[in-house]
Amino acid sequence: MTKKFPFAVVTTLFFIWGFITCMNDILIPYLKGVFALSYAQAMLVQTAFFIAYFIGSLTYFFISASTGDPINKIGYKNGMIIGLVTAALGLALFYPAAQFHLYGFFLGALFVLGLGFTILQIAANPYVAILGEPETASGRLNLAQGFNSLGTTIAPVIGSYLIFEVFAKGATGADAVKLPYLIFASITLLVAIVIGFIKLPAFTNTEKVEHPAGALKFPQLSLGVIAIFMYVGGEVAVGSMMTNFVGLPEIANLIPARASVFVALYWGGAMIGRFTGAAALSDLSRGVKMLLAFVIPALVFPFLIYIFHIKGFEVSEVFPYIPFLFILAIGFIVAQYNPAKTLILFSLINILLLLIVLNTSGKVALFSVVAMGLFNSIMWSNIFTLAIDKLGKYTSQGSSLLVMGILGAAIVPWFQGFVADQIGVHHSYVVPIFCFAYLVFYGWKMGELASKKE
């Protein structure tokens, strides 16, 4: 069996968890209104969801350290199925949460959903990395993450339409989420059943893990866990606050249903960047990489323009975004298609964009924050592959530790919400700057370690 088919199958999982994860960005303003919450309270949506990643992966790590790696025992395929079934249960729990009108019940459902995605990520990310040559692992993971971003791009549009428009009619309390999340639960369970019948290549590692926490002895991993924490925390914080940010009078003064299109553009930028990164970090020739760095954004961008069009915006309103596509392409070329160098450069660009956001208003601030999605794009894939490089028998254990770093999405958005309650949504965007500053350090450190090995 060609590895292209199993790669395509696993890529659908990236799409599913991207779509459902980004639905949280719609839930935050919706539940904030339904339950009359503060920004910090509303951000508990992300805290409950992503704290599950930490608890789930920490539990996985302890099991791995004490009794052996679970994925090596049950296989990647079974790990993915267990993750999907658990996620489907979390999605189904949204119905009783809405029925009883309890915010705490919603948070519990999100926690179960997060546990499912934790198992899914521990199994799927390293599986994609080993479905080919190690040198092109970043390219494969970027491509899979590109479809993850396709999910995060269309989720705000579809989600806001379903919750704020279709099912909001005649709904009381939190009833508008009942049917959408039952549909999501059914689809997720169906995918789990389908994967159960599909034959996927099995990868096993027969080497014995002598040290219970041996993965931590590798500096690329121990520093990488913090890098994942900072990256995911910064990315999710920016996206979670965006609907409220776009609604500010000094920015665009849009209601949530219309502001969601800019959330879609933010995550759509990640999609463009990841598809471009898949080519840039592959084994293609340098000339082809340079060409695709410009061609891919040009081919994908019309899809984002179409989203603006169907939401009732003039196409010209998205034109200020175009210069950032050129900066993205040039960035890949300047970084010489190197994962560590690209991470450094794109983190620096995001810091600059955040400084612009803090010191401007209107379209300048709006498109500066939205464009960050382009430069967030390759960070997960680059950090993940740099961190698990040469871990050998500790790869799955290292993967669970990296997924543990997703805890950043539980803490950083909540902290930004807390800061927003104190100094306002606009100025709360100072928080992610510290996240991207660490990523500059991590990229530099990985480059330094690579040069020493040479």
Image (spheres, grey):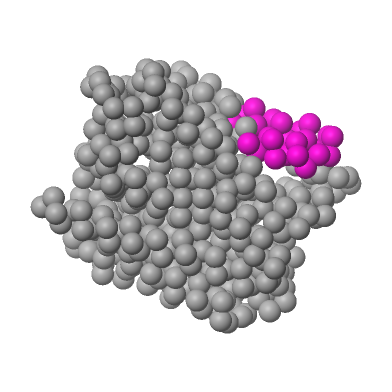
Region rendered in magenta: 87-111
287 horizontally vs 296: left or right:
left
Image x and y of residue 98, in percent:
80, 38
Q: Is residue 327 above or below residue 64?
A: below
**Residue 94 covered by magenta stretch:** yes
Residue 119 visible at all = no
User: What's the residue at 70%, 68% (across, down)?
Assistant: 422
Residue 251 sits in quarter: bottom right
Q: Is residue 224 magenta?
A: no
- Measured along the vertical axis of the image, is residue 445 above or below residue 83? below
- The answer to which quarter of the image holds residue 110 is top right
Residue found at x 57% / y 25%: 85
Image-based side of 5 in relation to 178, left or right: left
Answer left or right for 63 relative to 249.
left
- Residue at 57% in and 68% down: 429
Residue at x-position 54% and y-position 28%: 84
Identify the image quadrant of the N terminus. Answer: top left
Picture quadrant where residue 99 is located: top right
> Compared with residue 58, is residue 446 higher up or lower down, i.e. above or below?
below
Residue 348, percent from left and from top: 38, 69
